[in-house]
Image (spheres, rainbow, N blue to C red):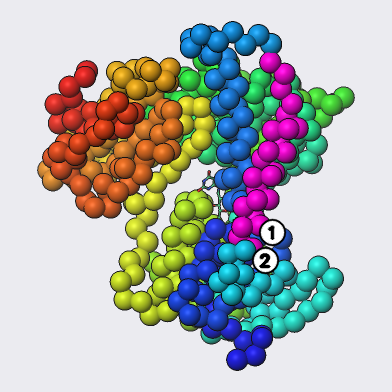
Amino acid sequence: MSDTQFDLIVIGAGPGGYVAAIRAAQLGLKTAIVEEQHLGGICLNWGCIPTKALLSGAALAQQFKHSQQFGFSLGAIDFDIQQLVRHSRQVSEQLVQGIGQLLKKNQVTVFNANAQFIAKERLELTDAKWQKQQISAPHIIVATGARAANLAHVPVDGQHVWSYKEALVPEQLPKSLLVIGSGAIGSEFASLYQDLGCQVTLVDIAKQILPSEDIEVAKYVQKQFEQHGMTVLTEAAVQNIEIDKGQVHCHVETATGVQTITVEKVLSAIGVQPNTQNLGLETLGIEFEHGFIKVDPWCKTNVVGVYAIGDVAGAPCLAHKASHEAILCVEKIAGLTHVHALDRSQIPGCIFTHPQVASIGLSEQKAKAAGFTINVGKFPLQANGKALALGETTGFVKTIFNQETGELLGAHMVGHEVTEHIQGFAIAKYLEATDESLAQVIFPHPTLSEAMHESVLSAMQRAIHI
Ligand SMILES: Cc1cc2nc3c(=O)[nH]c(=O)nc-3n(C[C@H](O)[C@H](O)[C@H](O)COP(=O)(O)OP(=O)(O)OC[C@H]3O[C@@H](n4cnc5c(N)ncnc54)[C@H](O)[C@@H]3O)c2cc1C
């Protein structure tokens, strides 16, 4: 086989693409990956990882604030946001380098270029010096991800109006910030900047913040945000903005009329749009659904030999969904027989706000709308010994069970490090645990996870500590 002929080619080296390439190589396929920017994609460079590095700084700021409770008097503390940004960029760079090494170790050929289909099994690559070459394979996976969607009347200029990229590398902490969009990305940045000392206004056109979450969770988090000093406007839309002398005047339509909110920066976080342009997909006759590439449960498109995974293949736009699709898609291509199709009800969602939010499965509203008769359990962290010891009593665990069968339909958590704990419910759900079986599980003491147990018991009217 020549250096331009492969068994499998992946376009895009995000958590979908690089995982697909490594797994394909492990399975003995001669594999290439094409990346036009940085290995690691949005996740490692401009998404999951650098945001969490910044959020760790914000969490520390909050710990300093509450350190008196533990006997410390810290006095005035200096904060250098540029050092926090440096930390965030260093973490990204380290991981990106690691991906390069992993690809090398697995003998994946890496092309630093833009890829475009010129036929079903053939790509044209264009590198930064406009040099072109062609490579081909019988299996090509599109893993090109997504980019920020824009509001036409609030154009991102990188200076006064930010996208998430500018919000990740601020030169200084703005005094005030208005965030448009309260999904995971918008809410995480709102929480981050508020906790670092910026005055934040969070605006969403939806009835609740975190529109995909259980209503009770969203209302609770909104209250917490407001207690931290954030202004939250739901059912509100930014009509237009005016930029004058370094300030942005935002005209926001609310239920009570139009308000003008003046801030130093605006962050547009209204969602993402798939990277499907200039790939030659239309020429191949690839089908789309709401702009995303339409795939079957094995990530196959309607064109034989062409696959799509991750953000470009549709919601939820999450790194772990991209990586999971990568594995199942490649294993199916390699002919493995144990492969399971993606079950979207098994994908956990984590939002790294303060307090954190984590969930899996159906919300109470969705479970009812789907026609289930349900038992709902709830346990506050206020009644959990470890939470009290940590001084982290904000939040609760809510569980939803099918009353007839006892099956766990959904779990929703708010509070300290719940993003680490949701995996317990993810495993339970995957193994089709019931309320009865979860009640039998022994949870260690003293841990925050005991609140998960108590929530299950609460759904069975058997909670001990409330
Ligand atoms: C601020 C922010 C925070 C986030 N936080 C989280 C989080 O905490 N948890 C979570 O699960 N998700 C999070 N996400 C979402 C997560 O980053 C994405 O779901 C994930 O990166 C999708 O992976 P992917 O492989 O599909 O695409 P991407 O990571 O977007 O990678 C696609 C790659 O394809 C390359 N590419 C595109 N077109 C071409 C082409 N024609 N030729 C060659 N290369 C091409 C791009 O350069 C890019 O590197 C966050 C996103 C953002 C923006």
**Mark 1: amino acid:** His
The foreground one among 344 and 394 is 394
Horizontal side of 359 relative to 364 (left or right) equals right
Q: Residues within 10 Å of mark 2 (few under 14, many from 20)?
A: many
Determine whether 15 is above or below 356 in the image. Answer: below
The circle drawn on residue 38 is: 1
Please report the residue visible at 48 percent of the width from the left and 65 percent of the height from the top. Answer: 326
Ligand 1 quadrant assignment:
bottom right
Tell me where the magenta segment starts and ends, as one range: 77-100
Please report the residue visible at 68 percent of the width from the left and 21 percent of the height from the top. Answer: 198
Q: Is mark 1 within 8 Å of ligand 1?
A: yes
Q: Are marks 2 and 1 in contact (CB under 8 Å)?
A: yes
Q: Position of residue 150 (x, y in %)?
A: 67, 46
Q: Quadrant of the C terminus?
A: top left
Please report the residue visible at 62 percent of the width from the left and 29 percent of the height from the top. Answer: 57
Q: Residues within 10 Å of mark 1 (few under 14, many from 20)?
A: some
**Mark 2: amino acid:** Glu
Q: Is residue 78 magenta?
A: yes
The circle drawn on residue 35 is: 2
Q: Position of residue 261 (x, y in %)?
A: 70, 21
